[in-house]
Image (cartoon, rainbow, N blue to C red):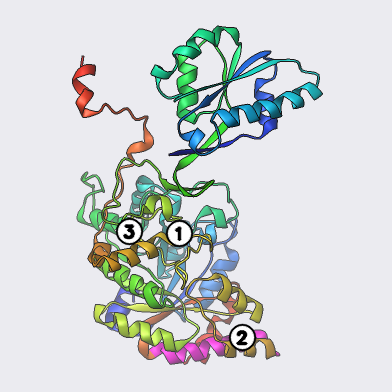
Amino acid sequence: MIVAERKPLDEIKEMIKGYRKILNVGCGGCTSICFTGGQREVNQLIESLKPALQEEGIALQLDGFTIERQCNGDFYLELDEIMDQYDAFLSMACGAGVQFLADRYPQKPVFPALNTIFVGVDRDLGWFEENCRTCRECIIGDTAGICPLTRCAKSLFNGPCGGTSRDGKCEVSKDTPCAWYEIFKRLKDQNRIENILKVRPAREWRNQTRGTMVHEDYQKRYMR
Amino acid sequence: MTFQERLDSGKFTVVAELQPPKGIDLSELFEHANQLKERVDAISVPDLQNAIMRLGSLSVCALLKQKGTEVIYHLSCIHRNRLALQSELLNAAALGLKNILILPGDPPSIGDHYEAPPVLDLDVSGLLEAAQRLQEGFDLMGNDLQGKPLFFVGTQIQAGATGQTLDQEIREMEKKIRLGAKFFFTSSIYDPNPFEDFIKKVAHYNVPILAGITLLKSAGMARYINKHVEGAAIPDAIIDRLIKASDKQQTSVEIAGEIIRKIKPLCQGILIVPIGWEHLIPSLLEQANL
């Protein structure tokens, strides 16, 4: 899941300054699941913004509308019908969704109400943890299902760095478990400790350019 | 005698670390280097240690080399990508620097430019491999080099580790030897007993190990190290001596001297880390009968 957090109210106010008819567009996908950009949060943001703007004597129309997924055109049909009524959009989707919305209506200013933080998991209710950096070169088969790029503070592919504490914590942050300590422990438990001696060549850093991927089942469809 | 010849000869080898200044005034560093010239076998020069921006290891090593000093050039992975790292190795070779200490480097978040991003491209294993490839006449992409460099490469090991962390370090050491590491500097040693245990576990690798020796300036510094430096466990007896010391410098030198005398039969040399007390190195060497 993509995890996001809401921007400070003042930053959002500053972005929409000067616009009078604004639609706050929520997303029923990831940002809804992480309690940041779904229907409920769309309404909460409107409720917070309206009195704040009224205090400053700014009268504006601020409505909310949540679509199933902001990153897929199939879900935009209803929004297409009403978009003309507004002169700007706030988006409560992840960075990808905001851009999809902006590409869909290129004549309208679109402002992100969220900061996209990471690709993560639910550690518990409302507690999210980053677990993947989308590096396009997954090696966790060798590292006992633990991503050293994401979970080692130095992103070491051939770790550890020598800064592991006695209780298996990271020298950069005492609250963080050392990824290589965890990898070593799990590999040992799985009787695969010889993996630790494998030398992993320097990464290819494939995620430095914008990615496009066509699923192999659909490749014929888009071939020109 | 070069650092490599000294290690190859099996003689006990003394290295001192001199930190480059923040700026370009090298007069003090040259003065220290000059005082140590006849007393130590090599000067080791850190590269952006603790992620504090300062003069680099490369220029200091090159200038010391010009003055006839045997030097060990440090190269940290975390501040450069693979182009810059390989180029730095070639720079070193072109300047006649052969001894290279490859380190992971400290993350910018702990230093004085804490907003800078780290460059997480090559790790120590990756850079060791790069050094090997360059010596074979190729870069990491397999492109031919015009003129092969020749290095004597080492890295660092955490000798104070215990339990699983120690097992990890030993495996890492094996990996790094396979990747061409010819010598190892250890983290600072304050207690000879666990160090002896460590040495027993890695003796079969038959690779020179030089023990880190830090001059402890005060009980406060010792407590700070115990709290914040992984693998460090300064015994209470040493901290008590520092508290009671009437002459802190003298006591610090005595403590370090005793440690050196005890660990001397266990390893092939020492790396003295003076942290501002460079002038005490000669008396430390006397204390240690070196």
Towards the viewer: B9 or B69: B9
Identify the residue shown where x is 57% and y is 62%: B26
> Which of the 4 quarters of the picture holds residue A181?
bottom left
Q: Which residues are magenta?
A: B246-264
Instruction: Tell whether B78 sits left or right of A195.
Output: right
> Which of the 4 quarters of the picture holds residue A188?
bottom left
Q: Which element is circle 2 on?
A: helix
**Is residue B250 part of the magenta span, yes or no?**
yes
Counting labels gives 3
Q: Position of residue A66 (x, y in %)?
A: 52, 23
| Chain hosting mark 3 | A
Towards the viewer: B157 or B212: B157
- Please indicate, yes or no, whether residue A154 appears anywhere in the rendered image: yes
Residue annotated with mark 2 = B239
Using a 10 Å C-alpha cutoff, classify the residue at mark 3 as few (fewer than 14 neighbours), some (14 to 19) or many (20 or more): many
Pair 3/1: label in front: 3
Identify the residue shown where x is 49% and y is 18%: A102
Q: Earlier in the sequence, mark 1 or mark 2?
A: 1
Residue annotated with mark 1 = B105
Q: Which mark is residue A158?
A: 3
Q: In the image, what residue type sits under mark 3?
A: Asn
Pair 1/2: label in front: 2
Q: Which element is circle 1 on?
A: loop
> Which of the 4 quarters of the picture holds residue A85?
top right
Q: Which element is circle 3 on?
A: loop
Q: In the image, what residue type sits under mark 1?
A: Gly
> How far apart are labels 3 and 1 at the CA level?
14 Å
